[in-house]
Amino acid sequence: MEHASIPTDAELVALAAEVAAAAQRQRVMVATAESCTGGWIAKTLTDLAGSSAWFEAGVVTYSYSAKEALLGVNPRTLESTGAVSEQTVLEMVSGALARYGAGIAVAVTGIAGPSGGTPDKPVGTVWIGWKRRGGYAHARLYHFDGDREAVRRQTVAAALAGMSRELGD
């Protein structure tokens, strides 16, 4: 029963298809900046045939130095708030949008487990940020249950659902 909320592959494909349709309708390119999902959001989107028409770029940044170099995250942000924080995900999504020329971007950073959690940031803690060109970045904190796979699947689904909402016409 607890795994009823874990999205299936088919559900992820359906969410990706919604994003793709909206991006094509609005003629916007999509970019992703991923940490805890290891490129799974980009993979789900680019599994769709014809994705090169609306998918611009995806970057996977696990280390602080990669977040700084590839997304322009401020080292002081990482030092003061850590990689799994609202400020970091906002800088990640803003950097992806600015650097990769897309019209909408999503960024994720979190602790998928099984280790790495702390009392303040337990396993399953995930920040997701979204930004449209010309708009403001915004982020949401999630606390997902389950093992590493479950946390990552739920993160991919929430990221895609949020993009779909952002692109809602």
Image (cartoon, rainbow, N blue to C red):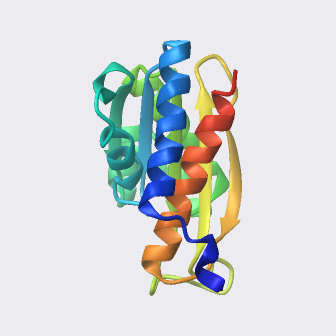
- Residue 117 in the image: above or below residue 166: below
- Residue 127 in the image: above or below residue 41: below
Say which residue appears at 47% left-offset and 37% top-offset.
Answer: 17
- Residue 18 in the image: above or below residue 14: above
Say which residue appears at 42% left-offset and 51% top-offset.
Answer: 34
Q: Position of residue 30 (x, y in %)?
A: 45, 29
Say which residue appears at 55% left-offset and 83% top-offset.
Answer: 146
- Outermost residue toward the front in this view: 10
> So how many labels did they put on this image?
0
Q: Position of residue 72 (x, y in %)?
A: 43, 38
In the drawing, does residue 69 fall left or right of residue 110? Answer: left
Q: Quadrant of residue 84?
A: bottom right
Residues 44 and 36: in front is 44
In the drawing, does residue 149 fall left or right of residue 48? Answer: right
Q: Position of residue 99 (x, y in %)?
A: 40, 26
In the drawing, does residue 123 fall left or right of residue 54? Answer: right
Residues 75 and 16: in front is 16
Residues 75 and 108: in front is 108
Say which residue appears at 61% left-offset and 46% top-offset.
Answer: 161
In the drawing, does residue 40 fall left or right of residue 135? Answer: left
- Residue 20 in the image: above or below residue 27: below
Q: Quadrant of the N terminus?
A: bottom right
Q: Position of residue 101 (x, y in %)?
A: 41, 19
Q: Is residue 74 visible?
A: no
Q: Quadrant of the C terminus?
A: top right
Q: Is residue 72 visible?
A: yes
